[in-house]
Image (tube, helix red, strand yellow):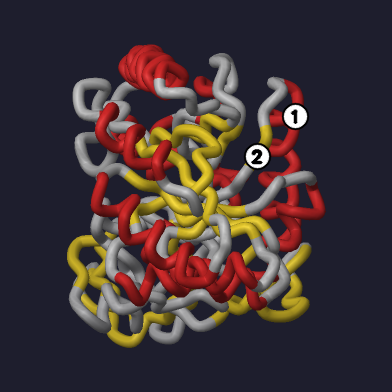
Amino acid sequence: MVDLDVVEGNVRRMQYLARSSGKALRPHAKTHKSLLLARLQLEAGAVGVCAQKVSEAEVFVKGGVRDVLVSNEVLGSNKARRVAELNSLGSRVGVAVDSVRGVEVLENAASDLSVEVPVLLDVDVGMHRCGVSPGNASSVLAAISKARHLKLEGLMGYDGHSGSLSAESREWEVRRGWRTLEEVSRQAGSVGLRVEVISVGGTPTAHLWAGTEATELQPGTYVYNDAHQVELGVAREEEVSAFVVAQVVSSSGGRAVLDVGTKGVSVDQGYPLVVSHPGATVASMSEEHTVLTAQLRLEERVVLVPRHVCPTVDLWDEFVAFRGGRAVGKVRVDARGKKW
């Protein structure tokens, strides 16, 4: 279930952070995957959204979102062609690139349809997943400069690794990441490419990147928050807005078993928190069951806060929306299950 009052407060606070620091806000929609919430963010002042898959971006474009950044590398002629097609329909669908081959695939697709595709050069700011380093950026920049149907809008740097660091270490990583982005920006200028956008960050570091000269923030988790963000000190408990409600189906000997398991709550970052029953903790989870260390009544309702809300959302078709403790509708997970 989703508390819309809390969602709206979270959206306002992040928009204020971006606006007060002179940054554009491009929320990452991979968290909520919802057209309803994307529209809420856009109405609050966001310039567009991020998506992590082309098929995810397609859902948002068809739903009326006209500015989407696929903040991921796109290789494969079919996916690249779909990006070009979305741009040909009047939407702006940008893509991250970090290889010469990635540039070539996008250029070929854009050329076939005679459209321009905006790209951001993905820079490795310390996560060591995707992205170029200053040492190998020049070849990709050269390829972009020769591409007639691609437009370099700027740079992108995602620091997802910072979510496991202390507050002090996160601050240090952002400073180091900014120096890396500055170096790659200088390299782009040296080959005649203009860097207009530097799009960065996630929920744990958005407030830190707001203090740099980056132009755009792309946090996602903040719209719902989760147990991990609370543990990091990035969010308060009352700023969590997404929950999973389960029911006790078996109870004996100080053990209560719930009717939801890993098919309903992601455990990639650990077990969820039990917020409805102080003192109750998760002892184990399997596909369809969660075992609590608590003596609870049969059929009793238990409210869980996921430790990682993004993959949890992708396990559901919709959420019950409520305000003031009363159900008011549904929040559909429109872009659920998009894999390419």
Tally of numbered tags: 2
Mark pair 2, 1: CA separation:
8 Å
Could you say which is closer to the camera, residue 95 or residue 292? 95
Which residue: 41% across, 23% down? 191
Looking at the picture, which amino acid does disc 2 mark? Leu
Which residue: 41% across, 16% down? 190
In the shown orientation, is residue 211 left or right of residue 4? left
Q: Say if 141 sits above or below 29 in the image.
A: above
Indicate which disc residue 5 carries.
none
- Residue at disc 1, secondary structure: helix
Could you say which is closer to the camera, residue 91 or residue 298? 91
Q: Position of residue 194 (x, y in %)?
A: 54, 26
- Residue at disc 2, secondary structure: strand
Quadrant location of residue 34? bottom right
Which residue: 46% across, 64% down? 111
Indicate which disc residue 25 carries.
2
Mark 2 touching mark 1, by CB under 8 A?
yes
Q: Say if 163 sits above or below 149 in the image.
A: above
Could you say which is closer to the camera, residue 258 or residue 265? 265
The residue labelled by disc 1 is 19
Quadrant location of residue 265? bottom left
Q: Which quadrant of the rendered structure holds the C terminus?
A: bottom left
Identify the mark nearer the N-term, 2 or 1. 1
Quadrant location of residue 136? top left
Q: Say if 180 sits above or below 29 in the image.
A: above
